[in-house]
């Protein structure tokens, strides 16, 4: 396996350097790293070049956002001869055995897309994402293995079907990109393009799994705009609905549901989903406090 790790960054110099140091300590070291720096002004690229000269750096224009940044990194890696891409975020923590674990699982399941269990770095550990067994689109609902923010049980193990996978530690064989294309940077520039990608893979008959043995620890307070569990004024949260770069974006959610819902219940499902986002603000906003 010729593995390339692709990471999109923006003005996160210290976070990026810390994450690269975690990768340098991995028990499995047969991989290359591509950092896509989308217009950072904090010296991220210069610091990475100085401390990690072996890392390839692609510089964006500042308006690539996450999806195009990942696509540019993926295209570069494929041009360099990659046979598999591991999509990762720099605002995560991984144990030294992480890459060895996910590579082994990938080798045991050739051709499959393999995602990672995502739990919070903050204590107490909570499940951030453990996979979606199936989608019930007319209910705007995923059948999740665990409820969001359940307390994490370290005994969780095994490989499980997941039609949705996020970009925080998902290993994709290059033939999958050749079959279904890249991430959708046009309609989903910042959020949902990772879920959309795995859904397209599943629809194309490609196995999509999540491993509860490959664990990412996420810093949930740094995961972006429009999160209902972060304490914020309701007006600020509502304004995030009108930014196409927010997770709660009306345009992003419209495009996502339009792509995957049957036409005859699309409008109901989309509207119901947006109402649930508003409800989630009141239900979950106290799940975590700002650090």
Image (spheres, rainbow, N blue to C red):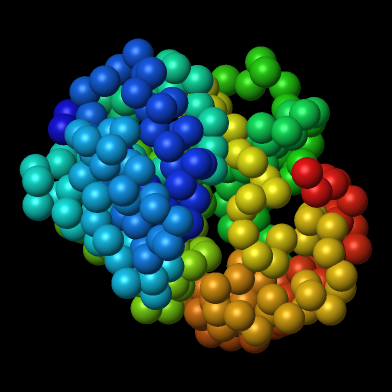
Work out which quarter of the rendered image holds the N terminus and state it. top left
Reply above or below: 247 against 212.
below
The reply, left or right, for residue 24 in relation to residue 251 is left
169 or 288: nearer the eye? 288
Reply above or below: 77 against 139.
above
Q: Position of residue 78 (x, y in %)?
A: 14, 50
Q: Is residue 11 visible?
A: yes
Q: Position of residue 239 (x, y in %)?
A: 73, 81
Which residue lies at the image location 65% right of the left edge and 84% below the top edge?
A: 242
Q: Is residue 257 visible?
A: no
Which residue lies at the image location 27% right of the left edge and 61% below the top edge?
A: 59
The reply, left or right, for residue 86 in relation to residue 119 is left
11 or 119: nearer the eye? 11
Which residue lies at the image location 16% right of the left edge and 33% below the top edge?
A: 2
Which residue lies at the image location 78% right of the left edge and 72% below the top edge?
A: 237
Q: Position of residue 51 (x, y in %)?
A: 31, 33
The picture quadrant where one finds residue 71 is bottom left
51 or 212: nearer the eye? 51
Q: How many marks?
A: 0
Reply above or below: 18 against 232.
above
Work out which quarter of the rendered image holds the C terminus and state it. top right
Q: Position of residue 236 (x, y in %)?
A: 79, 75
The reply, left or right, for residue 40 in relation to residue 261 is left
The reply, left or right, for residue 55 in relation to residue 153 is left
The picture quadrant where one finds residue 216 is top right
């Amino acid at each position: 396996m010729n593995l390339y790790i692709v990471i999109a960054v923006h003005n996160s110099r210290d976070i990026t350097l810390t994450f690269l140091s975690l990768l340098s300590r991995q028990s499995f070291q047969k991989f290359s790293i591509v950092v896509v720096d989308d217009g950072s002004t904090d010296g991220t690229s210069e610091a990475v070049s100085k401390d990690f000269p072996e890392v390839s750096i692609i510089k964006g224009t500042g308006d690539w956002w996450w999806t195009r940044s990942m696509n540019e990194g993926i295209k570069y890696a494929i041009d360099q001869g990659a046979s598999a891409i591991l999509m990762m975020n720099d605002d995560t923590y991984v144990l030294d055995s992480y890459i060895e674990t996910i590579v082994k699982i990938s080798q045991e399941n050739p051709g499959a897309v393999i995602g990672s269990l995502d739990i919070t770095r903050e204590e107490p550990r909570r499940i951030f994402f453990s996979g979606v067994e199936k989608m019930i689109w007319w209910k705007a609902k995923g059948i999740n293995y665990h409820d969001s923010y359940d307390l994490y049980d370290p005994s969780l193990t095994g490989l499980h079907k997941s039609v949705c996978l996020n970009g925080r530690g998902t290993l994709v064989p290059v033939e999958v990109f050749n079959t279904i294309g890249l991430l959708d940077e046009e309609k989903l520039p910042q959020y949902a393009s990772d879920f959309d990608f795995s859904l397209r893979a599943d629809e194309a008959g490609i196995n999509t799994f999540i491993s509860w043995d490959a664990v990412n620890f996420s810093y949930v307070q740094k995961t972006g705009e429009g999160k209902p569990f972060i304490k914020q004024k309701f007006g600020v949260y509502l304004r995030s609905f009108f930014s196409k770069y927010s997770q709660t974006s009306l345009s992003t959610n419209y495009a996502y549901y339009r792509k995957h819902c049957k036409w005859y219940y699309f409008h109901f499902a989309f509207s119901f989903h947006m109402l649930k986002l508003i409800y989630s603000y009141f239900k979950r906003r106290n799940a975590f406090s700002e650090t």
